[in-house]
Image (cartoon, rainbow, N blue to C red):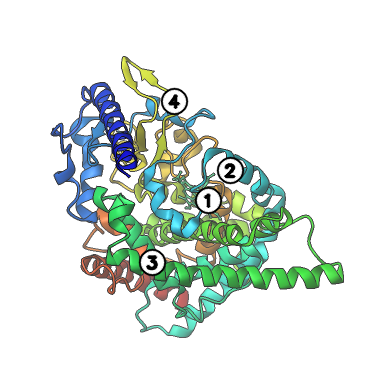
Amino acid sequence: MYVILIGISLVILVLFLRSLYARKVQYKALSGLPGPPSNYLWGNLFQFSKNIEDTFESLVQLNNHYGSIVVLWANPWKPLVVLSHPKFIERVLSTNMHVSKTSLYEGMKPFLGQSLVTSDVDTWKRQRKLINPAFQPRIFESFIPVFEFHGNKLINILKKKGENAIIDVPEFIDLYVLDTICELMTNVRTNFQETSDNGYLEARSNYLTIFMNRAYSWLKRIDAYFSYTREHQIQQKCVEVLKKFSQFLLDTRRESRKKQQALGTDDELNKTVLDLFLDAGVPEHILRDHIDTFIVAGHDTPGSTIAFALYELSRHPKLQAKVLEESTQILGRDPNTVITVQDSQNMNYLECVIKETLRHRTTIPAHERLLDEDITIDGITLPKRTEVSIAIYATHHDEKYFPNPNTFDPDRFLPENADKIQPYTYLPFTKGPRDCIGKTMAMLLMKSIITKLRIGKGKKIVNPPLQPKLYDLYMPIFNYDSKKCIDMLEKEKEKCIIALQHFVDLYILDTICD
Ligand code: HEM
């Protein structure tokens, strides 16, 4: 017995000494980099664990205060190097190396398992290759009936509300995108737009809220601690609800595939992500993880971008006029015209508006990678296994790369100006082998619904006296009832809904009802 206890103690001691040594080496390598003053023992722990809003604000301000390579010791044992330096970003993103994810993504694993966003490198490579056909240009035409069906439904719902109704447009857009993405990913037609109250949205919102809380609290990132918290219990309940929904999509698609195969009507050319995974014989629980991954990755980002693009257009009548003129030239004046892929691709000015929205209101402000080997540039070395954060929001708002960064100016993306944008400073979908697989689909979807909403009739423009706060930009993720779990977000949620509802929705209602 004693021998076993001594053995275990020795193993623990050796592991502790090893990690102490590794930390010493890492501290030596990184301590010369700029960053907020940190203590050797507890790093910047007490500066970055107040609440989500402070953390977001602090991270964004870092680059202004300390420059484009900043080291943070928010977790004293796991430093994070925040990069907004295009040369370093290029070195990380432009090769087949450094595609591993960091500890940040562990918090998504109870929901997404080992799927594209969260999987290890070998699994990710296989999965990405397998589903590539579902995102190739040759199948884009098959998206059009889906955009049309759910887009027309949205227009009808908004029309029925009547002129004096107060409409939370981000919520309506959100439901439209959710229905559209579910069908594009699984070939199953859902109806969130008319029956939104099924618990799925609330569960997903609460899960993501807790994920964000964990992401910015080193303590909550420790499984041994987190598994005893109330948030963990809530998260488990959320996962149960979420998995029921993906199981429903899976069962429904299996049934319809059987019928199609029996009738010989299955579409061999236009396969969805789910069909490709089903063909590959992926086990049941992993199929559910994949469904969840694609719905979560493909939903909030276009949803909030569309809401913000509409918001910006409501504030800039001249830009609206340009967008309207362009869509009238391409589509004519019949509101029932179907928008083809070619039409969408010809909408160059609308594309500039969306690109500028993705810059100005960067939907994913940062993402992380683990370095596979040392990187040295200009005498600065980041050692292998350093966790780096690619601070997209910071490059998008750096005066050096985007003059007057807080001005909404789609002309930056006109062909004559776009060439001047420095490589690796504009990264809404990130770049490299692990970039956003849904970027072209997202652009088609966003163009289709913004055009369908016929923004720019130019009747009544609401001029907002307020700007949404930085944190509001991330609020569409938390748009549903998060009361039960995170009280502190309530105030912010209201602010966001008021800001967007008041300034975007009334405008859209006016123009659409017109
Ligand atoms: C405005 C819309 C969108 C934006 C701004 C966006 C942005 C991004 C970014 C920045 C990443 C990298 C995240 C990381 O590495 O942590 C990413 C990855 C991803 N996105 Fe998107 N995305 C959008 C729409 C979509 C859509 C519509 C889909 C699918 C239907 C999608 C599916 C994915 C997937 C599966 C990944 C993981 C890719 C991989 O690891 O190989 N995204 N997206």
User: Residue placed at 26% from the left, 67% from the top?
Assistant: 486
Question: Residue tagged by mark 1?
Answer: 114
Question: Residue tagged by mark 3?
Answer: 205
Along the horizontal axis of the image, is 307 left or right of 28?
Answer: right
Mark 4: C-beta under 8 Å from nearest atom of ligand 1: no
Q: Is residue 138 above or below residue 84?
A: below
Give the Cα separation between the discs numbered 3 and 2: 28 Å
Callouts 1 and 3 close, C-beta under 8 Å: no
For marks 4 and 3 on the same chain, the one whose residue lies earlier in the sequence: 4
- Amino acid on which the number 3 mark rests in the picture: Ser
- Amino acid on which the number 1 mark rests in the picture: Gln
Question: Which of 87/154 is in front?
Answer: 87
Nearer the observer: mark 3 or 2; the answer is 2
User: Residue placed at 33% from the left, 20% from the top?
Assistant: 381
Q: Position of residue 299 (x, y in %)?
A: 49, 61
Dot 1 lies on which element? loop
For marks 4 and 1 on the same chain, the one whose residue lies earlier in the sequence: 4
Dot 3 lies on which element? helix
- Amino acid on which the number 2 mark rests in the picture: Thr
Callouts 1 and 2 close, C-beta under 8 Å: yes
Q: Position of residue 236 (x, y in %)?
A: 40, 67
Along the horizontal axis of the image, is 242 left or right of 290?
Answer: left
Question: Residue tagged by mark 2?
Answer: 123
For marks 1 and 3 on the same chain, the one whose residue lies earlier in the sequence: 1
